[in-house]
Image (tube, grey):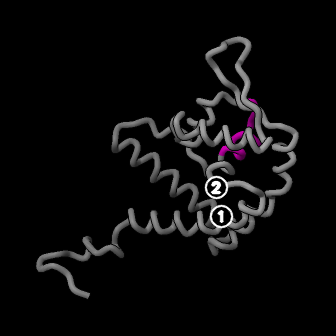
Amino acid sequence: MSTDEGATDDLLLSEQACFALYSASRAVTDVYRPLLAELGLTYPQYLVLLTLWESEPRAVRDVGAALALDYGTVSPLLKRLEAAGLIERRRDPRDERTVTVHLTDDGRALRGRVTHVPRTIGCALGLDDRARRDLIVLLRTITASTAAFRGVDGGSSAG
């Protein structure tokens, strides 16, 4: 391996936190892909459903905020989930400008079919429950710290 004259170890790819996080994120998402494909879901669609299984109905903007996604990203996800019969979008009768997202019976039933996913991901991570929880805390700390560094509201994150 060669480095430019004067380069420090800090400039090695293997020493970059951003690359380690990027690689880990891709690796974990690659484990999710076949698990969710069996259920007809993509990873982002799964995240939307997780937010709704926690609490529904939810305004579209609240789904986006929970996932740190903008409306232009959330809307197509909701459209595909609605076409699959898992959710319904409805205008809020109290405020016609607000669209709320509701699970259908099929959307609620799907929750019971994904209970193996977190366990499978836990095994793929090679972490026991304690280490997995510690990792989540660390990643949330990183998210909040970088948001504060950039001067933006970190919002809530999926995880």
Q: Residue at x 69, y 67 (%)?
A: 34
Of residues 125 and 95, the one drawn nearer to the viewer in this rendering: 95
Q: Quadrant of residue 30 in the image? A: bottom right
Residue 124: image x %, image y %? 65, 73
Of residues 11 and 45, the one drawn nearer to the viewer in this rendering: 45
Residue 3: image x %, image y %? 20, 81
Instruction: Give yes or no for contact between labels 2 and 1 (Cβ–Cβ under 8 Å).
Output: yes
Identify the main secondary structure in magenta. Answer: helix
In this picture, which residue range is highlighted in magenta? 48-57
| Residue 117 against residue 153 in the figure, above or below | below
Q: Residue at x 66, y 64 (%)?
A: 32
Residue at far left of view: 5
Q: Residue at x 71, y 18 (%)?
A: 92
Residue identifier under label 2: 43
Query: For the residue marked with disc 2, what is the amino acid?
Result: Tyr
Secondary element at tag 1:
helix
| Residue 24 against residue 109 in the figure, above or below | below
Query: For the residue marked with disc 1, what is the amino acid?
Result: Arg
